[in-house]
Amino acid sequence: MSDFPKHFVWGTATAAYQIEGAVQQDGRGASVWDLFTHTPGKIKDGSNGDRACDHYYRFPEDIRLMKELGVNAYRFSIAWPRIQPEGKGRVNPKGIAFYDRLLDGLLEQHIDPYATLFHWDLPQALEDQGGWMNRDTAYRFAEYAHLLADAFQDRIKSWITLNEPFVVLTLGYALGQHAPGKAYGLQAMPVAHHQMLGHGLAVQAIREISQSPIGITHSLAPAIPATDRDEDIQAATLMDEFHNGLFLDPLLRGQYPKSLVALMGEQAESFIRTEDLSVMSAPIDFLGVNYYAPDHVRANSKAPLGLEMVPMPDRPKTGFGWPIVPEGLTQLLLDLKERYAEKLPPIHITENGCSYPDLPDAAGKIDDSKRIEYLELHLEALLKALDKGVDVRGYFCWSLLDNFEWAEGYTQRFGLVHVDFETLKRTPKASYHWLQQFLRGR
Ligand code: GCO
């Protein structure tokens, strides 16, 4: 093949809380990230998403940037608290109206909307009832999905139910580093199960109304042992099952990895019901894969799961300190193909990108050559997987805009477009122009 297929999907990705701002405008309810970011000490630079990129008001300019970039798709997320301020019941018409306008703007420019229904901004009112620790939230999520399908029908060209339930489990409920800031450790496992149950119920709810493809986005990574010692190899195997298998096995096989059922122990009986696994494994049309870097794993008997993530000393790093390992993307995709074979649906890379402290020079230009190199290397790695028969249909660069990077606040910049968070001025970086040129040929 040695080039991307003619009808390959090229997009950029964002998320509501990271770019929209307008957190108290037009009837939006509070999300767990509103409370978390306004709790002192939670965010590295003490910032929040109250204004972010002001995308709620500036989305026409951002659509123009996508159009000029030459992408044919845009992955964004719908803020649940804009649609149902209490997470259930009452629907906020101004919330529906905002996404109506956004969809119209995208469709006018022939940019296919890929909508993520949950990208971490759970309505606080649901968290007050236990959030994803509470099985009821799965059913509230399905109701929310159903009303979105009813409101937007097939103007949403692809539905993505959840974004990265692994990160919600680990950072949101096990370690407390993300909203809602719970540190339940391994007692947080119901969060994994209830999110995947919500996914399965939402697939059923959407399919009652919409014919558009439905998928889910997972953060996935190959697990690399830090040394060839047996204990590190075993630790990497466990990390692979915890990071990848915990979500992909129920989704694609209708069962949990045996090692994790043992790990969950008795608590598993308290939240896993037999019929749940068949709901979770409802056939999907695509699997969204977010890839940034591998998991580099070492055994540590004192750590939870008996393992820890360690730096990769011999690899270049991004501005975020993440190792640059493009071959990890090829390996991940080949592993998925081998493990799940005919159960593996087509794949979209729904996020890939890097953070660097990009600032304009005296002439106002931003020469982010390292981002260009990162993207080139990862697209080459992606092409290697396609050449070996992995069915990848699309690639979404994270991110269109510099934005609110969760617990890092505005200290990390992932955008193809620089945002001055004082003036909100958008400035396309060199990587934007590079990608524009790359897409022109396609
Ligand atoms: C994620 C989230 C994004 C992040 C991006 C950079 O994958 O963690 O989907 O919201 O901002 O990945 O960390």
Image (cartoon, helix red, strand yellow):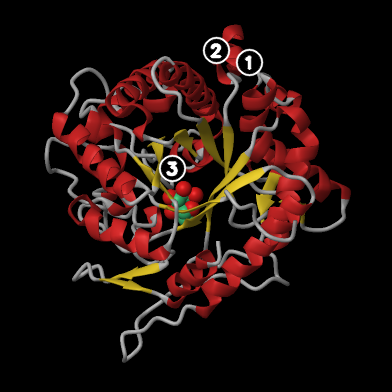
Q: Is residue 370 above or below residue 113?
A: below
Q: Is residue 430 left or right of residue 394?
A: left
Q: Residue at x 75, y 23 (%)?
A: 258
Locate residue 280 relative to residue 195 in the image: left or right: right
Q: Which residue is mark 2?
A: 270
**What residue is drawn where x is 50% and y is 67%?**
440
* Above-or-below relation of 365 to 314: below
Instruction: State which tag comes first along the sequence, 3 or 1.
Output: 3
Secondary structure at numbered mark 1: loop
Residue 373: x, y in percent? 59, 74
**Residue 419: x and y, percent?**
30, 68
Q: Quadrant of residue 100?
A: top left
The disc at residue 218 is none
Circle 2 — which element?
helix
Distance, label 3 to label 2, CA atoms, is 23 Å
Which mark identifies residue 266? 1
